[in-house]
Image (spheres, rainbow, N blue to C red):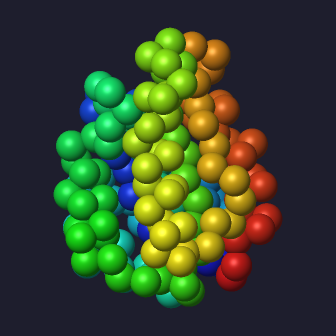
Amino acid sequence: MATIGVFVGSVFGGAEEVAEEVVSELKSNGHDAELFTDPSLDDFLAYRDQVALVITSTTGQGEIPENLLPLYLALNDQFPLMPALSYGVIAMGDSSYGEDRYCGGGRQFDALLQELQAKPVTARLDIDACVNFDAAEAALPWLQDFMKKVPS
């Protein structure tokens, strides 16, 4: 089974709740999973040869939440290439804010990880708060597919 770091960006706790359910599901399926709610660059780099899962809400004008922003900026500034990293992104947003802002936090993280040569396990999941009242309910089917494809 895989060793997976779950890195969460949350403002009001919604993404953190989804991340907690995801970690529970990963563990119940035999994976070694650890949740990071205030992740550092060192935390993230510890998984550079394994699997990272970013679960993030989107704030304001399509931005990354404050607790995840330092990690994003450090990765962007130091630009450590990570071709051995497999990753997934669950992006949470509200489509009523407009297409250019919708799930912006997750879209930005996904794009950066691709620039760092990390390999997506499967396509990013965008969860729309206008459609999915329970984000975890929307995330769990995607997670099943992610777990089938994740390298162990």
User: In the rendered image, which quarter contains the C terminus?
Assistant: bottom right
Q: Position of residue 40 (x, y in %)?
A: 23, 67
Q: Does residue 132 lie above or below 88 as drawn?
A: above
Residue at point 54%, 25% (across, down): 99
Task: Please state if 149 lies on the left or on the right of 27 as rendered.
Answer: right
Task: Please state if 77 lies on the left or on the right of 55 as rendered.
Answer: left
Q: Does residue 72 lie above or below 103 as drawn?
A: below
Task: Please state if 55 lies on the left or on the right of 66 as rendered.
Answer: right
Q: Position of residue 132 (x, y in %)?
A: 62, 20
User: In the rendered image, which quarter contains the N terminus?
Assistant: bottom right
Q: Does residue 139 lie above or below 85 as drawn?
A: above
Residue at point 44%, 55% (across, down): 109
When asked about the image quadrant of residue 137, the answer is top right
In-front residue for pair 58/132 = 58
In-front residue for pair 35/132 = 132
Residue at point 25%, 77% (across, down): 78
In-front residue for pair 86/6 = 86
- Would residue 17 be seen by someone viewing this image from the given angle? no
In-front residue for pair 95/45 = 95
Residue located farthest toward the front when viewing the structure as drawn: 100
- Would residue 136 be seen by someone viewing this image from the given angle? yes
Q: Position of residue 27 (x, y in %)?
A: 58, 63
Residue at point 51%, 56% (across, down): 110
Q: Position of residue 58 (x, y in %)?
A: 38, 34
